[in-house]
Image (tube, coloured by chain):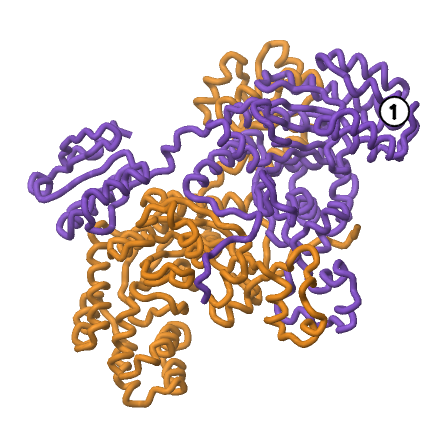
Chain colours: A purple, B orange
Amino acid sequence: MSDNKPSIPKGTRDFTPKEMVRRNYIFRSIENTFKLFGFQPIETPAMENLSTLLGKYGEEGDKLLFRVLNSGDFLSGIEKEDILNSSLAALSSKLCDRGLRYDLTVPFARFVVQHRNEITFPFRRFQIQPVWRADRPQKGRYREFYQCDADVIGSDSLINEAELIQIIDTVFSDLNMRVLIKLNNRKILAGIAELIGKADLLSKITVAIDKLDKLGIDAVLEELRSGGLDEREIEILSPLFDLKGENSEKIIFLRKYLGKSEIGQKGLDELVEVLRLASLTRLNCPLELDITLARGLNYYTGAIIEVKTSEMDMGSICGGGRYDDLTGIFGMPGVSGVGISFGADRIYDVLLHLNRFPLEAELNTKVMFVNFGSKEIDYVIPVIAVLRSLGISAEIYPETAKMKKQLSYADAKNIPFVILAGEEEIKTQTLTLKNMKTGGQERIELGNLTERFNKLL
Amino acid sequence: MSDNKPSIPKGTRDFTPKEMVRRNYIFRSIENTFKLFGFQPIETPAMENLSTLLGKYGEEGDKLLFRVLNSGDFLSGIEKEDILNSSLAALSSKLCDRGLRYDLTVPFARFVVQHRNEITFPFRRFQIQPVWRADRPQKGRYREFYQCDADVIGSDSLINEAELIQIIDTVFSDLNMRVLIKLNNRKILAGIAELIGKADLLSKITVAIDKLDKLGIDAVLEELRSGGLDEREIEILSPLFDLKGENSEKIIFLRKYLGKSEIGQKGLDELVEVLRLASLTRLNCPLELDITLARGLNYYTGAIIEVKTSEMDMGSICGGGRYDDLTGIFGMPGVSGVGISFGADRIYDVLLHLNRFPLEAELNTKVMFVNFGSKEIDYVIPVIAVLRSLGISAEIYPETAKMKKQLSYADAKNIPFVILAGEEEIKTQTLTLKNMKTGGQERIELGNLTERFNKLL
């Protein structure tokens, strides 16, 4: 038993009631929107078999997996020499069969393959759960954080892309947050790589281009050069770097620029159709074709979506895209999917910074009963039960403490109404209701309680 | 990339949409009741420092903790000899600084001490989160399961106990599940041990008595004997084993039986007062004084509460009690608390067995639009947006598949209404609404859509 000041692991957080209510406000908005669009919830375990997770997030990702030590005799079956001579990675794989989930996409792919016979395709699922990454903690980056994902799997119709864009628009309108939705298509990027005759460098080119926003043109050119592109090839790329104007202008430019690249033209066709379908309903958020958008993950094959707020400097707060073969890694090839993921923690930080959380009335107890002592308690307990049966959140101060202390408690908890019932109230079968905001008091007859509170709240 | 059939770790579960809706029905009932009684939500990280967890659950509990391998070079600072010569426990403590939370009570105690300056006491908090135990999985026992806890900390008023009993009563009434609430007091058990002059054997006596229900009288007597009680002492205990009748009769018996045991009489006083306070509101569930109720955990110091269903054979589905010094282990002594914990997984199993989940209408998309092709899509997309803006969950079948396939999808997802809009409907600016239950169809004019659906749903 230690009596050191207790703490929690680096990069993790406790959530106090005040923070919980705010977070739940965001989760509820996202969840309600997912449901409105016909998506259904699933959940997967925090721990997955390491064989499910390893090799799915690149070498860097493998290192960032939290591994769970095998329970019981975790050394059984390991030779002592192995311990002394194995690499860290090899040894950790011997010590650990399980790891904490790193994102929701790979567990979802595993879920789809495992439950393929119970699922009706196309499958529209959403999932809101924490994920864990052994990243170096820093501002806005945590080792435990929530992802809120919606995916459609088993349909390659572009209607899905358009609907996901509508979901994004609905959520951020609902949260009263101005954002810019950026759209690209991986096939256009492939077409560009084809144009300069370096299809094999697609990954390097897109990774470099993706940094344009963050690092600026010079750094990107440097990276392209060191990635193996010569000046002629960079020359071909360069018109893309300052592509500006309306979506329609960009489309006209790209139609010509992509020329005979079949894959590039196909990507542009898809993008044009998604823009058209999405615009069949009125969007509140601007939707912008951004050719520099690539996003890190290599598994996108079609649409690429990213959302940033225009109200403060904060990275991507939502992103996603189409992946043509997500479940192939688990032995179920040829199933196309498309999805988006909301970063609830960043959205929280933005709304907090902008002071845009709504009044948190739902956080609080609506009515507190002052505790005057045993006889008075017996009088008010049935009254509390009546209020609760009306759906009114109510509590009694449990101790017979000084009035001042009880009222400060109500104040600290932001409780709007306090009920006082002492000898006088018992005698007259009444209650005294105090409005904590105005300080005003009124006497209510027991028989009129329901009526009075129906009016009040 | 493996193409083995994917699986999840033993003792963990995936939750499909159907299961999620049912689970959320239980969580929502518990959460709403907690809020109704003025409890506020908190959340703590899945990982805690091992120093927070170790030594809090007994030797057996320490073994059941899931430990998380240190990230990066987990061997750094460990001598090779240490690896070869350390005990498993010692070595695992070197390899792992963190573990997965084992329950919600210890993290809550840690939270209270860590945030003591931000908290208004008495602090009524609830917490609904998963916990992990490396237990041998078996029917109804999982390695990842949810706990739903409510505690009041910083008040030793017995009103709290009475309110927790009311919460239990409200939740199970709401879930339409018949249960028996059992109540005991640890001080009565201490009084009994005092009576037979073996206060030091309290723990052994209570552990044995606790098994009366499960193992029967003979096994308990055997355990008491082997625990060091002689026949005379067992003779003193024996009237307790078949204590029957109304609570009032048991109280009269105990008042006499406990005689001069000060702590025993105090326990009885507390119990009588809790029964009295709880009965000031009408309870739907019977509340029974059960002197054999001890519950495994040693930290209870006053009331002990346990709930079982009378409708099927299933262990405890809710339990709790008062603990006088929970935060003392983290350096904040003398703070009394009382709490209860609902076992959502067992409640789920009971409701499923009894077929008592309500109609899961909220699970489903309310309206599916059939996809007849590109022109028709353009016509219906704005219509879907209107329905969604009314809060009606709607989706469009994303592929232009055969009608039969689209309708089977709606059927499989239990979608009650399907809208068909082909050439004819576009021409007349109407929609055809099909009721999937009755098979009936009707034509709706676009302008009457809102009105018609407000009536329908």
Residue type for callout 1? Ile
Residue B354 visible here? no
Label 1 lies in what chain? A
Task: Name which quarter of the figure residue A91 lies in.
Answer: bottom right
Residue A146 visible here? yes
Residue designated by label 1: A234
Task: Name which quarter of the figure residue B198 lies in.
Answer: bottom left
B446 is higher (above) or lower (below) than B190:
above
Q: Is residue A291 left or right of residue A439?
A: right
Residue A127, horizontal then vertical, whole percent: 59, 41
A305 is higher (above) or lower (below) than B334:
above
Residue B255, horizontal then vertical, whole percent: 17, 72
Residue at 43 percent across and 58 percent down: it is B105
- Residue extending farthest to the top is B427
A414 is higher (above) or lower (below) than B293:
above
A121 is higher (above) or lower (below) than B331:
above
Q: Is residue B124 left or right of residue A149?
A: left
Residue B176, horizontal then vertical, whole percent: 37, 49
Residue at 61 percent across and 62 percent down: it is B96
Q: Nearer the viewer, residue A128 or B263?
A: B263
